[in-house]
Every structure is written in C-alpha cells, then in structure tokens.
Amino acid sequence: MWSGIVTQAVPIFNRTAQKAMEYDLVSEGKAEVVVKVAGANKSDPKFGDSSVHGKTFYGDGGQGLVEVEIFVPAQITQNQTNVLMQILLHEMAHASGLVEHSSDGILMTVPNIWPDGSISSTKTSKKMPPFFLSNSSIMRLKKIWK
C-alpha cells in the first residue's frame, strides 16, 4: 500500500516547502530521514485499526539531530493515495523540524478526511490535493533551515 508513496511525496514536499529546505531520495544507509512501515520490530509504534497518522522519532547522538525515523501504519482504513500522501507529507514536515501541530499549518493540523479521499484542515477550508503548507509554517521552516 505504501509502495511508491515516498517517491511521489519527496518532490511534492520540496515544492510545498517552497525552498525552505529540501529532501533528496538516496539509497539505504545514507538517509538522515528513514521511512518505515510499522510492525517489523517489537519497538515499532502501534497504530489502531482506524489510524490515519504516522509517528516520527528523532535521534540525537549528543550533537544535534542525527537521524529521523518516520513510521507509517501497516494497515489503514482509508487507503486512498491522497490519504497516504497526506500522512507521509505531515510526517515529513515533522521530520524537517516542525515538531508541534498548528491550527494554521494545513499539513500540520489534524485533517478532515472526506470519503472521496480529499483532505481539508477545517470543514470549510480548501480541499487538498494539491497539498500545501500555510505561510506561517513555511516561515517556521525557513527559520529552522536558513
């Protein structure tokens, strides 16, 4: 179910972050941000049957941020591509330094997921895709990465 989502998500996130920072796709062993499907190890986070979220863990090594692991659920009740993409883009934003959720953050808020797979931050806001971050979230990213 997650096959190909990372490859699609990286350029979308890079465009969405508006050059505040960028992700590059690299081979295993070289990545500072690793995406994993939860359930392979006992220490992996547990997700409920109806989960529509992931979990991001930060590794510190005593010298600042060293590695980030993004876990996505193995099973999800709404497995439309848009929902999977929203979950991963949200976790990528966490991995880039936007740790806290924000009511104005579009991708950084708890979303409304509609039966057709479209997503919105409020019941009356513009539906995604296309996916986007709010200007305030982009400014927070720029402060982190510039």
Image (cartoon, grey):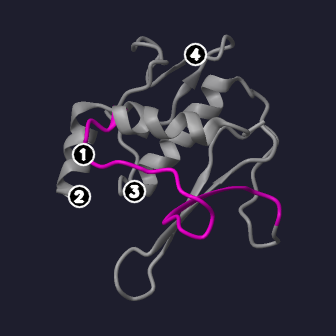
Which quarter of the figure has residue 36? bottom right
Verify CB contact (< 8 Å) between mark 2 and mark 1: yes
Q: How crowded is mark 4: few (under 14 residues within 10 Å), some or many (20 or more)?
A: some
Q: Closer to the N terminus: mark 2 or mark 1?
A: 1
* Residue indicated by mark 1: 20
Q: Which residue is drawn at 20% across and 49% down?
A: 142
> Could one spot residue 32 in this view of the protein?
yes
Position in image of residue 99 (x %, y %):
39, 56
Q: In this view, does 52 lie to the left or right of 119?
A: right
What label does residue 118 carry, if any? 4
Which quarter of the figure has residue 40? bottom right
Q: Residues within 10 Å of mark 3 (few under 14, many from 20)?
A: few
* Residue indicated by mark 3: 99
Q: Which residue is drawn at 49% across and 71% down?
A: 67
* Residue indicated by mark 2: 144
Q: Nearer the viewer, mark 1 or mark 4?
A: 1
Residue type at mark 4? Ser
Real-space Cα separation, disc 2 to disc 1, in angstroms: 9 Å
Tell me the chief SS of the magenta region: loop
Which element type, helix, strand or loop, lies under badge 1? loop
